Image (cartoon, helix red, strand yellow):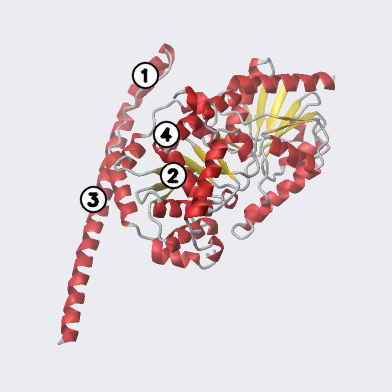
Amino acid sequence: MNANNDSIDIESVVKQVRLEIEKEHLPEEILAFEAIDPETSMLNVDNNYAFSQSVLDDRITECESVKMVDWYRDIEGNAISIFGKKLIRRLNMFLLDPLARDQTRFNDSILCVANQLCMRCEEQERRIVALQSEINELKNV
Amino acid sequence: MRVIQLVPTLAGKDAIGNEITAINRILISEGFESLVFSFSVFRSVATDLNVCTNFTEADFRHDDIVIFHVATGSALSSLFYRLECTKIMIYHNITPPNYFEPYDLISARSCRFGLQQTRYLSEKPGFCFADSEWNKNDLRSMGYTCPIDVLPVVIPFDDYRIEPSPTVLNRFSNRNGTNLLFVGRIAPNKKYEDIIKVFACYKKRFDSNARLFLVGAYNSGGSYYISLLSYVAFLGVNDVYFTGSRSFDELIAYYSIADVLLCQSEHEGFCVPLIEAMLFDLPVVAYDSTAVGETLGGAGALLDTKDPLQTAAVVDRVVRDADLRAAMIQRGRARLKDFEYDTIKQTFVSKLEEFLRGCR
């Protein structure tokens, strides 16, 4: 970062940008938020926003990355607390290790279910497209 | 001498929770016996806090100093009114109820109740701290005549020096494009709809790969949140992420991947995310309302318009103009010095001592 940055007047730059935009463009026409009726907007959400392929893909990727649950955790602190925590960790291993394995198995299964359902949906979508084209052909005959 | 901080709800990592923890440490270092009285305690509060959740008026002594944190309506206000010990108020501001009325009548009622109570308490504290000049003026307008000093929200900078969540980094580092960010609970005064408008313009005119991250807790059945989702659908704008409340390392990851913090809020008593952005060298583009300009202190691009295209153009300039960006980052770093723990500690201790000397 150089010393010249001190001479930049942020306020002037903002004014300049706004003037440029005012000269170059017509104001943007955007639907007013007030046009959204809170009472009925749930319907719109259901119709238009309830499903998003990208959100689904992102979430499944996220689940894949964290499905393995490890009982072991690194320990921080001073020498005495590290010793105490290590002891507690060792004493609890017999309990935590099987729990973590069970959780990992469950996570794996649930992810498998999600992936299977996604594949089933894709298969059904392909079938719908094929049936639709058959209907169209029959209509044309 | 006992100093009791009184707060309706104590949460581990929110602005008021952080402030209570910091004040507790300051009080202990200055030789006071420090306690926190709160009816409900959420999430992981600092382990060094001496918290009492089951208390009555009889638990307060005449020689106690009680510091009451005000941010909403609460039954503790009437308790604070009746106490006969030395009373101090820290005012964090209460959102005007009209913002909530179209969406959430319970929150609107709570805010209205809080404002009534704050007015009712105007003659009770001997001294007040306010998070900002804006909050100080708010108290004056409600009839407070006692001395009032500005004490910015204490932000524990060291807590932010942890590794960002690799899950968030991996998930969102897979493509180019500008990342816009705002952090705060999804509440109508924060004007998320205006952020979405600016983002829609920005995506259409300047960067079709841009993404908008809105990091903050929401009520999934709440009509404001549903209206926002519906608005996004009506505008047909993609890549808007309502992340919900995230863990601290995830929050830090969102700050790390962001290019600009975009604030369109219309009511802030301080606005902690502005300071957090400075901490992560993240330039801020904000609408100039309430305490926002004061907290920024010249370290960001402040606009007096809500025009989405003009705001989007300013965001674009901040993203593309390396010199402007560097200047904003530099000023942000300089501004952070005003919010350092030692600076705020010094203000708090000197004002408290001055007030207590006057009481004797």
Badge 3 sits on which subunit? A
* Residue identified by numbered label 2: B316
Q: Residue visible at 29% across and 51% down?
A: A57
Report x, y in % for residue A106.
28, 45
User: Is label 3 on the same chain as label 4?
Assistant: no
Q: Report, in whole angstroms, how far the alpha carbon at label 2 lies from the one at label 3.
A: 42 Å
Q: Residue B14 at what x, y percent from top left?
A: 56, 36
Percent across and percent down for residue B149 are: 73, 29
Q: Which mark is residue B322?
A: 4
Pointer 4 with pointer 2, Cβ within 8 A: no
Can you give x and y, in whole percent of width and height, for residue B316 in the image?
Answer: 44, 44
**How many angstroms separate mark 4 from mark 2 (CA)?**
11 Å
In terms of depth relative to the viewer, which is nearer, A73 or B128? B128
Quadrant of the frame with the N terminus of chain B? top right
Q: Earlier in the sequence, mark 3 or mark 1?
A: 1
Q: Are marks 3 and 1 on the same chain?
A: yes
Mark 3–mark 4 Cα distance, whole angstroms, equals 46 Å
* Residue ID at (42%, 27%): B162
Q: Nearer the viewer, mark 1 or mark 4?
A: 4
What residue type is disc 2 on?
Asp
The subunit carrying tag 2 is B
